[in-house]
Image: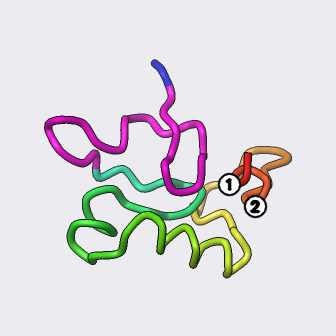
Amino acid sequence: MSAHLCPVCRYPELAEPPRTDAGPSYEVCPSCGFEFGVTDDDLGIPESEWRRRWLAEGARWQSSSPAPPGWDGAAQALG
């Protein structure tokens, strides 16, 4: 199984590509909390705006599961 990069925060471990020709994955990024197909399509929040807000709020881990050891959202986003 290959991992995919979140285009919002650069989290490298999404289970599915965020979008394909078939449409959005509806996967929620555990790092930034963006849900592909909902946050953008249904709520109308562009990836760039979500990224700006997430960084402004401290780039905190959004999943209820623990962050990977040594995870740093701001460093990841700039990587």
Q: Secondary structure at mark 2?
A: helix
75 with respect to 65 (left or right):
right
Q: How is the image coloured?
A: rainbow
Q: Give coordinates of residue 78: x percent, y percent.
A: 73, 53
Identified by mark 2, the residue type is Ala
Q: Which quadrant of the view contains residue 58? A: bottom right
Residue range (magenta): 3-25
Q: Which quadrant of the view contains residue 1? A: top left
Secondary structure, magenta segment, majority class: loop
Q: Give coordinates of residue 72: x percent, y percent.
A: 79, 55
Q: Residue furthest top?
A: 1
61 with respect to 22 (left or right):
right
Q: Which mark is residue 77?
A: 1
The correct choice, above or below, for 33 with respect to 79 in the image is below
Magenta-colored stretch includes residue 14 = yes
Cα separation between marks 2 and 1: 5 Å
Number of marks in picture: 2
Identified by mark 1, the residue type is Ala
Magenta-colored stretch includes residue 53 = no
Q: Give coordinates of residue 60: x percent, y percent.
A: 69, 69
Q: Which quadrant of the view contains residue 17? A: top left
Residues at discs 2 and 1 in contact (Cβ within 8 Å): yes
The correct choice, above or below, for 62 with respect to 31 in the image is below
49 with respect to 77 (left or right):
left
Question: Which residue position holds label 2?
Answer: 74
